[in-house]
């Protein structure tokens, strides 16, 4: 319905029209008869949970995958897009979640990649520089063309990606989860650029799972669920609540319900901590804080500002270069010892660290706890007992499918995370370290995970939460510490967490400088 | 996105190797045809030569014993994500351990002398496995490189010792004196004769059941013990191991020692069971073929035993074939073995995608 209305709306045909796109991977139907019309000169959002089929759909549009069925029309003309090259020729540009830039090259060199033109570079370079500078002026995309990419902040690197697409003649720009790596200020800057692009007649397709962004910047929004397109809306006519419900298929609670914290004794005391990365570079500097029983302390910050190293050091995985970490009043030992002293750890990267992908769920259910007498007797693994416990936990934490023999890699992101959470919570920790608890997790599971964390807090446990999702930290944490470049820039109570102030701290602007 | 597909157990461990093997034999048959011989007749001769009569079976199992030991050595290290290419050198050192034990303690009662000799094999092989393990764990030197280099070191040591030190006095062949009979591993035809079983004469000896026992122990270690669980975590994901408080370094050193010991035990079969003296070069490439055996056996002890039987049969049947078909010489047999290694080992993924696609289509969709 709505799709048709979009077509009739203007004289121009839709910039992109997909008709009846289907695609399956083995038994998984990633897209089922998807229809989509994106009006030319608009910003069109596509939302959906992980695994709803958004990325598959865009990868079909960009030529990475061939659809099993369906047609693609660009500017009203049917196109066969067999490769990204075909997509570029049709005027489609894509900015990926993970940038595809050559880091040691300058911005200009990156922009020239694939468009060198001619045997020698010189003539092309001068012409390209003029063209690019014109594009920069038109859209307010200020980037120093001679800067080396790896020295640029991520927000600027993203602008380079956009510039690259425009330079190649894209008038349809697809952005896949573009704000995941940005501070709120950088995200706002990006949205200004996108509006500029729209106002000058270009078309933007924005894929995201953040409803706030959809509301802030799009003109229209399409919702995907389970591989199907379930709704098209004008952004002005909808709300985050309605979109969330459409995405999940039922009503969801976006806010976390929790009462005030009742902090008790300190469980974790960190003083003047310094942690170095694998190359000996200090990543955490002079960090001091305390986490008490019965409170959630959140650490906010843009990814890569030392949170990961901090978390690993507190879990006993990464050595402490300087300073002191006390767990329950005694110095922290290595990872094995920390676990015997009731430290639970939900790691940031569950597939690299928290789970062994090719292990069955039951084998993963005791990872880190394998030495406990409940699971080992006389050196032998108590297999039957572990499988039984794993089955119990899967039921209690609603892990689907409820099959202890399924390999970790075969569960969805949300269910993998529930499996890790079940393991760490069921061993009743006094201190729980949680990194990015809802990264790559669908809304239904996010709700569940947040409830579990609050319940644990209310049971008098100490929780340290690290997340790059600002909303998550703001809604869960009782106190928020902001990290920038390895240091703690400031602290605020969770309730007073004002997004603008948080954003400034995340960007490294300390309280006294403002 | 795309669900990871996996084959049912029987297809993974039986159908797929069988397909690969058939192709290897098909190509081998073409080669035989090119040489102007009848491939069907060649297969008949080969199978008969390997299994047709008592002695043949004995020899097949004798060779298979070597392959079980060296195959297990590669397989067990593989579970820690390590590629032990040093089976040849570890087996050679194992032979040295056996020989020294047999020369010094060979006069003792067999029940004492034989276990000491076994210990010698495991100890010397184990040390030769521990060195690259230590280098990997503490210095980050890749085991593939160090184990290959240690093969050469082992060969030099063995040459030096057998030419200059423990050579049988008054002769020029690089070998020791024959050991005292007390320390000889009983051959199975001797053991079974009093029980009324008349099997043909062959060097098949007590090392064969010991090899099977080792396969069982490896299975228990890797899949039943907490140590094996931790070993597999180390092999699949070092980050996960660190997260779980498991020391990758300790497990790497332990498993390389076990791996070397298994390779070293191969010397039991050749030195203590058949030749009864240490001969230079007794390892005869078994250490290297062990890599193919482990690959084909999917690093599972049962698979290793089955693959070892196949290679044992190829060795024994191949020798008979070369004897009966003059145009197929010893080198041709090596070509056939090479083809088996190529298709079953190196190209093992050739049929996998097709087979997986086939199974996915016929299987209900998992929820």
Image (cartoon, coloured by chain):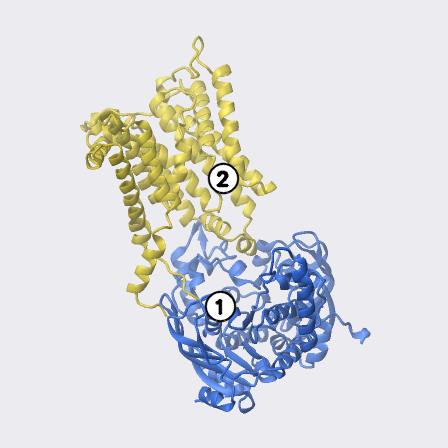
Chain colours: A blue, B yellow
Residue B298 visible in rendering: yes
Structural distance between the alpha carbons of marks 1 and 2:
52 Å
Give the residue drawn at x 40%, y 49%: B223
Q: Which residue is mark 2?
A: B256
Dot 2 falls on a residue whose secondary structure is helix
User: Please, which residue is most extreme toward the right here?
Assistant: A512
**Left or right: where B265 falls relative to A141:** left
Depth check: give the residue in front, B77 or B109: B77
Which quadrant is home to the N terminus of chain A?
bottom left
Give the residue drawn at x 56%, y 48%: B247
Dot 1 falls on a residue whose secondary structure is helix
Q: Residues within 10 Å of mark 2 (few under 14, many from 20)?
A: many
| Percent coordinates x, y for residue B278 in the rendering | 41, 21
Depth check: give the residue in front, A362 or A14: A14
The image quadrant of residue A307 is: bottom right
Q: Above or below — where is A172 with respect to B226?
A: below
Q: Above or below — where is A188 with respect to B2?
A: below
The image quadrant of residue B172 is: top left
- Mark 1 falls within which chain? A
- Mark 2 falls within which chain? B
Depth check: give the residue in front, B321 or B180: B321
| Percent coordinates x, y for residue A28 in the rendering | 38, 69
Give the residue drawn at x 66%, y 80%: A192
Q: Which residue is mark 1?
A: A86
Which of the two discs, 1 and 2, sits closer to the camera?
A: 1
Which quadrant is home to the C terminus of chain A?
bottom right
């Amino acid at each position: 319905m709505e799709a048709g209305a979009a077509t009739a709306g203007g004289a121009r045909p839709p910039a992109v029209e997909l008709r009846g796109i289907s695609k399956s991977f083995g038994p998984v139907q990633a897209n089922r008869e998807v229809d989509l019309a994106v009006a030319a000169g608009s910003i069109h959002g596509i939302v959906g949970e992980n695994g709803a089929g958004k990325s598959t759909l865009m990868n079909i549009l960009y030529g990475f995958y061939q659809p099993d069925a369906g047609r693609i029309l660009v500017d009203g003309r049917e196109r066969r897009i067999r490769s990204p090259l075909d997509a570029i020729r049709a005027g489609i540009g894509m900015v990926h979640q993970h940038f595809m830039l050559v880091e040691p090259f300058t911005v200009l060199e990156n922009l020239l990649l694939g468009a060198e033109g001619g045997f020698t570079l010189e003539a092309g370079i001068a012409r390209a520089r003029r063209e690019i500078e014109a594009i920069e002026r038109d859209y307010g995309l200020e980037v120093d063309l001679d800067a080396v990419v790896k020295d640029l902040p991520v927000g600027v690197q993203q602008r380079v990606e956009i510039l690259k697409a425009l330079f190649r003649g894209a008038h349809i720009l697809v952005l896949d989860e573009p704000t995941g790596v940005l501070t709120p200020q950088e995200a706002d800057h990006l949205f200004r650029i996108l509006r500029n692009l729209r106002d000058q007649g270009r078309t933007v397709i924005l894929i995201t799972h953040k409803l706030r962004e959809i509301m802030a910047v799009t003109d229209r929004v399409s919702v995907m669920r389970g591989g199907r397109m379930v709704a098209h809306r004008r952004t002005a006519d909808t709300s985050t609540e309605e979109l969330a419900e459409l995405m999940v298929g039922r009503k969801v609670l976006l806010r976390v319900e929790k009462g005030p914290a009742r902090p008790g004794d300190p469980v974790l005391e960190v003083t003047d901590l310094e942690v170095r990365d694998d190359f000996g570079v200090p990543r955490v500097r002079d960090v001091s804080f305390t986490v008490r029983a019965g409170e959630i302390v959140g650490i906010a910050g843009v990814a890569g500002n030392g949170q990961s190293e901090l978390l690993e050091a507190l879990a006993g995985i990464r050595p402490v270069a300087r300073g002191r970490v006390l767990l329950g009043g005694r110095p922290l030992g290595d990872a094995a010892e920390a676990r015997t002293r009731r430290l639970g750890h939900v790691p940031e990267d569950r597939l690299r660290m928290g789970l062994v992908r090719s292990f069955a769920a039951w084998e993963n259910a005791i990872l880190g706890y394998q030495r406990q007498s409940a699971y080992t007797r006389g050196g032998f693994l108590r297999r039957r007992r572990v499988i039984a416990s794993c089955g119990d936990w899967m039921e209690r934490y609603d892990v689907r499918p409820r099959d202890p023999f399924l390999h970790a890699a075969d569960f969805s992101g949300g269910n993998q995370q529930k499996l890790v959470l079940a393991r760490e919570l069921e061993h009743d920790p006094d201190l729980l370290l949680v990194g990015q608890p809802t990264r790559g997790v669908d809304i239904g599971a996010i709700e569940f995970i947040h409830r579990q964390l609050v319940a644990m807090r209310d049971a008098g446990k100490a929780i340290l939460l690290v997340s790059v999702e600002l909303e998550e930290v703001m809604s869960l944490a009782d106190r928020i510490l902001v990290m920038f470049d390895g240091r703690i820039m400031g602290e605020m109570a969770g309730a007073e967490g004002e997004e603008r102030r948080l954003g400034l701290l995340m960007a490294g602007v300390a309280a006294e400088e403002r | 996105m795309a669900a990871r597909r996996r084959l049912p157990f029987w297809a993974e461990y039986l159908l797929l190797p069988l397909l690969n093997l058939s192709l290897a034999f098909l190509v081998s048959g073409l080669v035989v045809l090119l040489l102007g011989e009848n491939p069907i007749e060649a297969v008949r001769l080969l199978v008969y030569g390997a299994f047709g009569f008592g002695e043949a079976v004995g020899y097949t199992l004798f060779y298979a014993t070597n392959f079980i030991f060296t195959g297990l050595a590669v397989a067990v290290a593989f579970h820690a994500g390590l590629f032990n290419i040093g089976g040849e050198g570890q087996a050679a050192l194992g032979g040295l351990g056996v020989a020294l034990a047999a020369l010094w303690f060979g006069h003792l009662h067999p029940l004492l002398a034989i276990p000491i000799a076994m210990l010698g094999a495991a100890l010397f092989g184990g040390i030769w496995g521990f060195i690259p393990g230590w280098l990997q764990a503490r210095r980050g030197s890749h085991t593939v490189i160090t184990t290959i280099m240690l093969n050469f070191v082992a060969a030099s040591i063995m040459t030096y010792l057998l030419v200059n030190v423990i050579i049988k006095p008054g002769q020029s062949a690089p070998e020791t004196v024959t050991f005292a009979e007390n320390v000889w591993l009983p051959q199975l035809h001797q053991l079974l004769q009093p029980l009324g079983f008349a099997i043909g004469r062959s060097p098949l000896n007590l090392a064969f059941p010991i090899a099977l026992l080792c396969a069982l122990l490896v299975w228990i270690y890797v899949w039943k013990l907490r140590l094996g669980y931790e070993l597999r975590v180390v092999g699949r994901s070092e980050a996960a191991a660190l997260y779980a408080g498991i020391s990758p370094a300790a497990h790497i050193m332990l498993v390389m020692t076990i791996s070397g010991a298994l390779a070293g035990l191969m010397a039991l079969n050749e030195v203590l069971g058949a030749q009864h003296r240490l001969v230079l070069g007794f390892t005869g490439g078994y250490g290297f073929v062990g890599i193919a055996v482990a690959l084909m056996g999917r690093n599972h002890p049962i698979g290793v035993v089955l693959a070892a039987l196949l290679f044992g049969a190829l060795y024994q049947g191949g020798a008979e074939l070369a004897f009966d078909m003059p145009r197929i010489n010893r080198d041709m047999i090596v070509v056939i073995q090479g083809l088996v290694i190529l298709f079953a080992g190196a190209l093992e993924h050739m049929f996998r995608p097709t087979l997986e696609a086939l199974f996915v289509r016929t299987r209900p969709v998992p929820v």
